């Protein structure tokens, strides 16, 4: 007999008007996530990642088709979830944020994985200021995780529980240490007192070539908004300015590419033993 | 009086069934582009880029609203186009590949910007093998252009005139030297005879750390398919294998991030004077 977190087989839900479905679907909106402190993951990959990352799963929704197709994930998530529900494909449509849904969803409480006091004074952290595009935020996390950064600090901008950002991060936003802060000035001042360097990545001007800058020791590297860059207030808090020199004539790098190069330049100098998995 | 390429004011088209509109809309499909040797650009930015990049514009379509909103681009493109047509918003919808169209389109002949004989033996070229995702192909071109590579060689995979790839490249696919090849073995053998190194970027194994490899002199660096990587046939043609060491535990870099780091590593060693524009 199948085993479920609650010990008894799942209920079925076939109505899109079911209050539980309406509440879960509302989590596709940022303000509802903010209000309730919960978020929704979609797809076999992200539902499995939530459980593997130790995220609490309050409700798990799956169609019978998804249960069969992703049976391993179904077993994993239904074993961990507080409640499991079998939903109809029609209901799955209502919960979906994608063109072609995998018909599996988790409702999870949004607990921050890291707090400010977890910041290691000798670590390397990426901090985003007002990055708006969820694909960009997700790409920054994915690069930071793959290249071995110690965590991400998010100040303003895109919601880290946005379905798009979760997908673009390939689940990294569930696994990777993330701090949300609304008071970056205090956070940065404390980091500076602990001897950390604060780098602003900027477009040009008097900034040092990123490959030549001294990136040793504890560092926080700030990546600014896609259009406006780093704010003047934030710039004033930084101890160093760096830039990626562009040899080409015409265009700039996109935000995700610039972030990848930036994290790479910091991490490759940090003397960890490289693990060549790619 | 306004000046048009043809010397007389534009015709109006208000029917989605107009044969010219049907022919242009068909270019949204890859097989139609292949059959006719023409492609479609959408949006003020890409239509302007086509003209600035010296691409022939056979037909230019714009609504009155777009003509007013992007008057500079309208003047530029209508001055260069062989024929200009004012279309209704309804017709613009039919030509559009985007959620929110800017209602400006060009039909252009697809002439390759670079041929194999233009490859400089001391240059740096990125070669993609069977990259399928147009966003990835566009991102590779954008990074290659921004960082100053000498050109892109495309072997198999996504159509370089795909509307998505054009957008993701920010017009780079119109401006940047691109060679399409169906016989990469001959191309690579000739490059090797000219003293060029051929690098395969691979996931792991016996590959050298990209930051430590000798990347001097003429180089072609191959980026493989998103899932399958570089084919065994292609690998056998390469003279060097390199990898981006991952310090993180969980995930891999996405294709665009890996390409950005790869191009960056090659370009920053090439001793050109850096232009710090970003």
Image: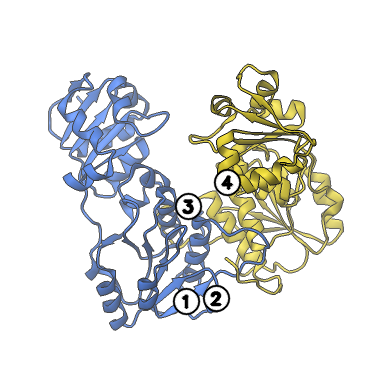
Chain colours: A blue, B yellow
Indicate whether A73 appears above or below A260: above
The residues tagged by marks 1 and 3 sit, at their Cα atoms, a distance apart of 28 Å
Location of residue B16 with respect to B84 vertically, above or below: above
- Which residue: 29% across, 38% down? A28
Residue at screen point 60% across, 68% down: B277
Residue at 31% in and 40% down: A48
On residue B252, the disc is: 3
Q: Badge 2: few (under 14), some or many (20 or more) residues near its Cα, within 10 Å?
A: few
Figure quadrant of residue A4: top left
Residue labelled with disc 2: A205
- Can you tell which mark lies on residue B168? 4
- Circles 1 and 3, Cβ within 8 Å, touching? The answer is no
Q: Secondary structure at mark 3?
A: loop
Q: Which residue is mark 1?
A: A241
Residue A119 relative to residue B128: left or right? left
Q: Position of residue A196 (x, y in %)?
A: 35, 79
| Image quarter (top left, top right, bottom left or bottom right) of the N terminus of chain A | top left
The answer to whether the residues at label 2 and label 1 have Cβ atoms under 8 Å apart is yes
Q: Residues within 10 Å of mark 1 (few under 14, many from 20)?
A: many
Q: Is residue B204 visible?
A: no
């Amino acid at each position: 007999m199948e085993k479920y977190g609650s010990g008894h087989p799942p209920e079925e839900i076939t109505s899109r008007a079911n209050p539980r479905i309406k509440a879960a679907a509302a989590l596709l909106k940022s303000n509802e996530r903010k209000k309730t402190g919960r978020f929704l993951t979609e797809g076999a990959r992200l539902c499995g990642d939530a459980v593997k990352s130790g995220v609490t799963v309050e409700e798990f929704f799956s169609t019978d088709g998804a249960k069969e197709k992703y049976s391993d994930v179904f077993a994993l998530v239904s074993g961990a979830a507080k409640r499991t529900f079998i939903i109809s494909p029609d209901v799955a449509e209502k919960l979906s944020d994608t063109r072609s849904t995998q018909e599996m969803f988790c409702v999870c409480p949004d607990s921050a994985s890291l707090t400010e006091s977890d910041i290691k004074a000798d670590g390397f952290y990426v901090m985003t200021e007002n990055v708006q595009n969820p694909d960009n935020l997700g790409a920054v996390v994915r690069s930071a995780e793959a290249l071995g950064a110690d965590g991400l600090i998010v100040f303003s901008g895109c919601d880290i529980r946005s379905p798009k950002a979760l997908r673009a991060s390939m689940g990294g936003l569930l696994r990777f240490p993330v701090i949300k802060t609304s008071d970056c000035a205090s956070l940065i001042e404390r980091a500076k007192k602990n001897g950390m360097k604060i780098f602003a990545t900027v477009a040009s001007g008097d900034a040092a070539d990123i490959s030549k800058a001294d990136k040793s020791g504890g560092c926080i590297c700030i990546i600014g908004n896609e259009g406006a860059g780093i704010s003047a207030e934030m710039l004033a808090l930084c101890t160093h300015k760096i830039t990626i020199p562009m040899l080409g004539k015409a265009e700039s790098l996109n935000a995700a590419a610039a972030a990848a190069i930036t994290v790479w330049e910091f991490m490759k100098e940090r003397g960890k033993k490289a693990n060549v998995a790619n």
